Image (tube, helix red, strand yellow):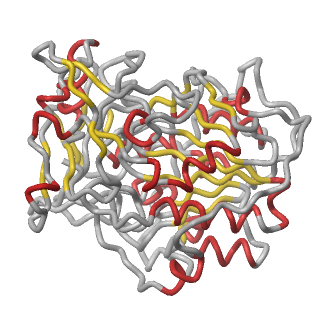
Amino acid sequence: MLACCRGQTEATPVASTAQPASDPLRVPSTPVEHVVIIVQENRSVDNLFNGFPGANTVRSGENSKGQEVPLSQVALAAPYDLSHKHSAFVTEYANGELNGFNLEGRKCNKDAPASGCPPSDVAAYGYVPESDVEPYWAMAAQYTLGDEMFQTNQGPSFPAHQYLVSGTSTISDDSTLKAAENPVTPTGQATGGCDSRSGSTVLLINLQGKEEQKVYPCFNRISLMQVANDASVTWRYYEAGPGAGIWHAPDAIREIRYGSSYKDVVWPSVDILRDIRNGDLANISWVTPTVAESDHPGKNNGTGPSWVGTVVNAIGESPYWSSTVVFVVWDDWGGWYEHVPPKIYNSYELGFRVPLLVISPYSKRGYVSHVPYEFGSILKFIESTFDLPSMGTTDVRATDVTDCFDFNQFHPFKHIQTEYSAPYFEHQAPSNEPPDDDW
């Protein structure tokens, strides 16, 4: 079902601050007419692709006491979550020493067995066994894995998803204040966007790294959706359900939420399979999951790899394969151990590594790209592909992902084996269950 504005009054349009792209490494003319960004949740490279051939991963890490701590196998659906607020990043980053992961907080599910919830001082030192995520490894083996994709922000999901549509989480185009945490209602429930309850707020971070101000989580800021609208490039944003939400990025952009293109925010997420079958794939698509299939620690049920594989199979086995690039990215590191220090640009950028999969007929086969990327790298590729102007945010400085491609080759699609397939996801009851507070 297509979303609608439900009779809300339109706000005054925001003037575009888009700037002509000046990067000399713009993507040349390619066969790409569709870009799909599949956004999963809360995993680092050391956690999700540990031991993948050619990837830079480790099996142990130092703690704040100078001790070497082995990384233990932790199931994808393990019943605990780790703190990944901005303060958690600061603690773990430890002024570049990356030895504060034993000081990380963790939260066990109420029904978690004692054996499933390790002590706090070792909980972050974990990696998912390959057997839990075989479709991800299969996609990485067939296509390209980026092991130097850094989450742009140093915090949780809500601002991360803003970076994936705007290249920033600033509250307006002329502000240096960035949304830094997940918004909450007056009663402390997770929320996000212009549909949030009255009195909801999100903490902001300033240039000095202080979180001292709060605002309602609805922003007058540029977005790639707005830039695409101006150029008549089609887009859709697929989400589990309507309204306010941590992962509902367009809902927080006033220009989109109260504009006519809000019809292109679609729910449930599984409708992308219908649109692919019906020959109705937009030029740009963002695909966000339900909580169950999200990979979110402490909340997922292990179906995330099948969900992603199902979307990729639908594209690969359709006429869209020859003209599509699929990026699979995880929105934040989730608190998990990471041994590669990010480049620090300012008080909130960059964060730790997250995995990146680049899937297309033109992706380098079985390739691990060690080029440093950030979320703006995906946005820059889209801008270049569709000849869109730069938004003038982190897309300007970001390295383009062209290292992942060889447009002189074409590889037929090979089906990704998954435990669950399209009928499972299409027949499950709709769910807009919120994630936890990404504490």
> Image check: 319 left or right of 23?
right
The image shows residue 338 at horizontal and vertical percentages of: 34, 28
Q: Nearer the viewer, residue 301 or 401?
A: 301
Q: Say how many tags the image has.
A: 0
- Write the residue at 9% across / 42% down: 119
* Residue 83 falls in image quadrant: top left
- Write the residue at 82% across / 33% down: 406
Would you place residue 176 above or below residue 64 in this image?
Answer: below
> Image check: 430 left or right of 146?
left
The image shows residue 43 at horizontal and vertical percentages of: 38, 43
The image shows residue 330 at horizontal and vertical percentages of: 45, 45
> Image check: 33 left or right of 368?
right
* Residue 435 falls in image quadrant: bottom left
Would you place residue 279 above or below residue 52 in this image?
Answer: below
- Write the residue at 85% across / 54% down: 412
* Residue 65 falls in image quadrant: top left
- Write the residue at 43% across / 36% down: 50
Give the quadrant of the N terminus: bottom right
The image shows residue 130 at horizontal and vertical percentages of: 46, 48
